[in-house]
Image: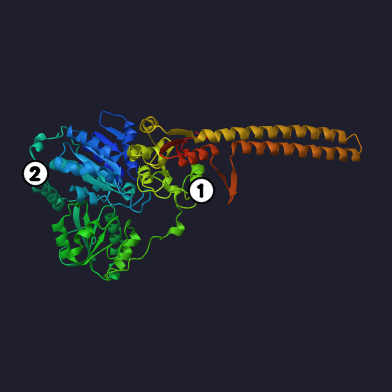
Amino acid sequence: MKEKKEALEYTGFQALYLAALDSDVSFITGVPGYPVTSLMELFLRITGGRITGDYSARWFTNEKVALETALGSSVSGRRTLVLVKHVGMNLLSDPLITSVTHTIGAGLVIIAGDDPGAKGSQNEQDSRWYGRIAEIAVFDPTSPDTAYRSLRRAYELSEETKTPVLLRVTAGLEKTKGKVNRLQKSSAPHPEFDREIWKKRMVEKHRLFHFRTYPLLEEEAENTDLNEVRKRTAENTADGSVSGHGYLGIISSGFTSSIVEEILSKQNKFRAEVSYPEVSHLSLGLVNPLPLEKIKDFLKSNQKVLVAEESEPFIEEQIRIAGKVYGKKTGHLPYGQVRPEDLEFALEHIEEEILKLEDTTSLGAENKKRVGICDNCAYLPLYRFLSTLDVRIAGDMGCSVRSAPEPLVAVDVSFALGSAISVACGFEKKGIAVIGDFALAHSGILGLLSAANTGCNVLVLVLQNEVAAMTGGQAVPDLRKVVEAITSDVFVFDIDASEKEVVDETQKITDETEEQADITGEVTDKVEEVANKIEVEEVANKIEVEEVANKIEVEEVANKIEKLTDKAKNEIKVENGIEKLLLTPKLSELIQAKLALPGLSVIFIKGKCRKYCSGTFC
């Protein structure tokens, strides 16, 4: 491929978008989730979710389905891209692992968005491990330019090996900007699935893969320019191939490589203060398979080697047997996200063989506010009510997980997206499953099928806000008809309509109060007119009468408001200066009644997400 002369500046995700276009990708599937949502939106802004002359981009609710659809596209000769967040890899791993020995057609690349620091996820899972499990190539780009080159090469490698390829990204790459040298565009035709593989038995396919395919991946890892050694000395700070034995070397991958380069460039200005004369840097952009020969030479060339990577010690675990390897396992670097100050700490303490692994579980917690349920969330009264019940409650990885910590303390456990129903089925006594409509469509519907089939004793509360609220407000299918086909005990409650009734009646009383105030004002005016014509004593008597009349009117208004409160049974409590609306008794009594009955019950609780709509009740 010939490079074009222009080198414009792009973010890492913009570079991936351009690489997909230049690779002739015609089908993109994605499941919403941080941090890949913003990457998928680059495609959707152009297509609007529809097929264009160049490609089709679609949101899916389940990662397994997204990959399976992509596999169908690949075998028919279309280059395909799959976008998921790191935990989505767990769902699609089944068809992924089988596809490797099954073989595919046109190039298929999975971009997995990892979340070091767990800014928008339930864990810091490292997607690179799936490269080892599935035995596929894993790219871990450092910069916008390497992201572009990685994706371009990934499609070629996918077709050469007839296997999917994984490309791992983080939010750090999304925010990084740099110049990108675009390459000549690819063009069709692309290979379709070759049925010759069916002449082989399953065991023969596996042996053929290791005889023919995996060696191609190992050769790629050793020879790609995405895996490069950068050496610096006190006299020469530029990249080069300085020979000789060094004291310290750093191996890094992904976005961490850019942090390493930044720190080393800064330190080279003050080299005289550093105890070691030379620092070598092996930056890995292709991390599975590891370039073992290149790493072996690097280890020989340095007395000590620090491995800097996010989130798990993926590289470190595979090479630490060689000794003189430092990183997360030795306490020099933290698990999860690696920041510049973490790397500086490791370099300052590199003379120490093992550092005590400090408890950093509460590091900086006093300065960080936990993200909770939105203040105007329609379901806040429900969460407060659930916290008063003496039953186990399984939440989900939607908004409900944010109700688990204080001050709400509503749900007890929350393991995975779509898990609430299945988890609640395992409770000793009848409990509650709180699940969003997106989570139900994602995989929760399978738990509901199992619950109905096995006679599970559980109350399912489906929070139907019609959007994927935590991942960008994507539309969610209405599964009420499907659920009614699974179980007969289904009830629908509109929490917004219930609140609106209270608001309307309260407004009516407010209007009546204002009308009474107007009448009182008229009486006062008349009293003032009379006061100008009669004695002061008479005026005083009339004012006294007026005060009595006003007191009676106020008492009447107060009685009406009290009656409204009793009628609606809607209490207002003031705690710490914050007004808290409690759940309408109609719903609370329904929940308690369903809990008292054996078997499976489902309540759809409709309520608009205030974040993605406007108006009091949208």
Q: Return the x and y of residue 617 as percentages of the image width and height.
A: 51, 34
Q: Does the rendering let one see residue 183?
A: no
Question: Which residue position holds label 1?
Answer: 388
- Rendered residue at 30%/51% (across/down): 125
Which of the marked residues, 2 or 1, is nearer the chain's N terminus? 2
435 and 183: which is toward the camera: 435
Check the image and tell me how it is coloured: rainbow
Question: How many numbered tags mark residues here?
Answer: 2
**Do the residues under discs 2 and 1 have CB atoms within 8 angstroms?**
no
Quadrant occupied by the N terminus: top left
- Rendered view: 203 above or below 239: above
Q: CA distance from mark 2 to mark 1?
A: 60 Å
602 and 232: which is toward the camera: 602
Q: Can you tell which quarter of the image residue 18 is in?
A: top left
484 and 32: which is toward the camera: 484
Q: Can you tell which quarter of the image residue 499 is in?
A: top right
Within-10-Å neighbours for mark 1: few <14, some 14–19, many 20+: few
Q: Nearer the viewer, mark 2 or mark 1?
A: 1
Q: Is residue 452 left or right of residue 378?
A: left
Q: Which amino acid type is marked by label 2?
A: Glu
Question: Which residue position holds label 2?
Answer: 204
Q: Which amino acid type is marked by label 1?
A: Thr
Residue sitting at the far right: 535
Within-10-Å neighbours for mark 2: few <14, some 14–19, many 20+: few
Q: Does the rendering let one see residue 211?
A: yes
Which type of secondary structure does the marked residue at label 2 adopt?
helix
Give me the disc on residue 264: none
Q: Return the x and y of residue 592 as percentages of the image width and height.
A: 49, 41
- Rendered residue at 15%/32% (across/down): 189
Q: Is residue 520 left or right of residue 463?
A: right
